[in-house]
Amino acid sequence: MLRQWTEVLGPAKALALLLAAALLAAVAVSQLLISLLGFGDRVAAALCAGLSALLLAALLGRVLLGLLAQLEQSTLQLKRFSSTDMLTGIVNRRAFLGLIEREWALARRYETTCAMVMIDLDHFKRINENFGHRCGDMLLRQIAEASSETLRQGDVLARFGGEEFGLFLPHTDPLGALDVAERIRERVERLDFCWNGHVIPVSVSLGVAALQADHHSLDQFVNAAEDALHMAKADGRNCVRVGDGLMPGRAAELRA
Ligand SMILES: Nc1nc2c(ncn2[C@@H]2O[C@H](COP(=O)(O)OP(=O)(O)OP(=O)(O)O)[C@@H](O)[C@H]2O)c(=O)[nH]1
């Protein structure tokens, strides 16, 4: 009950209420002691009241501090849950956008490079249908793990939902981003994913976008990578494609 109170009232009000309760209880206890011991003088009464108040306040304070620590822990856990994708353990889309917003804004402001890669499992529906959702879930976890292995500190990988992942690469030029995307594609292709004795071939399609002057919002930047991903799907899957206008020569060459 104390914990619910602390949550509802907030720590400061709960502490004030507890101290008031401790004082009232102390007065009641001292009155009881005085009547039991038969003391009649005011000094004894004041001493009893003071001592009881001190003891009760210390006791309740301790309880409250314990509760506050628990509350803080729960809040932290809640924060972690709300920003993590429970299946794969990596950040979710909402947290991802929050994490990269500052980096993206700085890159725009100071005209430095950064890139966005969208990764999507190929024919995942078929895998789910043929081998079941538990198999699909296991595969999603392995894709997250395999993709993470290829990254540097500072890169941010997130599950965007379903079988789609987003990857932000700070301080990375278009060719660097293509390298990372291609490495992930190859790593997944070599995954040797096994379920109930069946080796299931898996692949991903990837779309790459590098920050450009006409990306006025983070959404536009992410959408550019999504568009490139659609190109990769349209071009037969298991490949990397770059957004239009990124690197005219290179994009055409990669699409060929
Ligand atoms: N096991 C599992 N399946 C999921 C999860 N989230 C989404 N899916 C499934 O992912 C499948 C996505 O199917 P589609 O969007 O058709 O994509 P696809 O089959 O990979 O086809 P392409 O992307 O075009 O190659 C659907 O069957 C969803 O039910 C999840 O958390 N776990």
Image: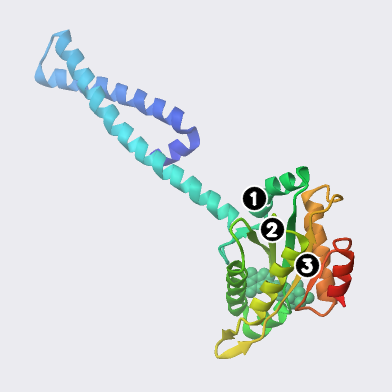
Residue, x 59% and y 53% (percent of image)?
Answer: 83
Residue 216, above or below 118: above
Q: Earlier in the sequence, mark 3 or mark 2?
A: 2
Q: Quadrant of residue 27?
A: top left
Q: Quadrant of residue 169?
A: bottom right
In front: mark 2 or mark 1?
Answer: 2
| Amino acid found under the numbered disc labelled 3 | Gly
How many neighbours does mark 2 have within 10 angstroms: few (below 14), some (14-19), or many (20 or more)?
Answer: many
Q: Quadrant of the C terminus?
A: bottom right
Q: CA distance from mark 2 to mark 1?
A: 10 Å
Left or right relative to 227: residue 134: left
Who is closer to the viewer here, 125 or 6? 125
Q: Any mark on residue 168, and which?
A: 2
Tag 1's secondary structure?
A: helix
Q: Which residue is mark 3?
A: 207
How many neighbours does mark 1 have within 10 angstroms: few (below 14), some (14-19), or many (20 or more)?
Answer: some
Q: Which residue is mark 1?
A: 99
| Amino acid found under the numbered disc labelled 2 | Phe
Residue, x 61% and y 64% (percent of image)?
Answer: 151
| Amino acid found under the numbered disc labelled 1 | Leu
Residue, x 89% and y 65% (percent of image)?
Answer: 248
Q: Quadrant of the N terminus?
A: top left
Q: Quadrant of residue 145?
A: bottom right
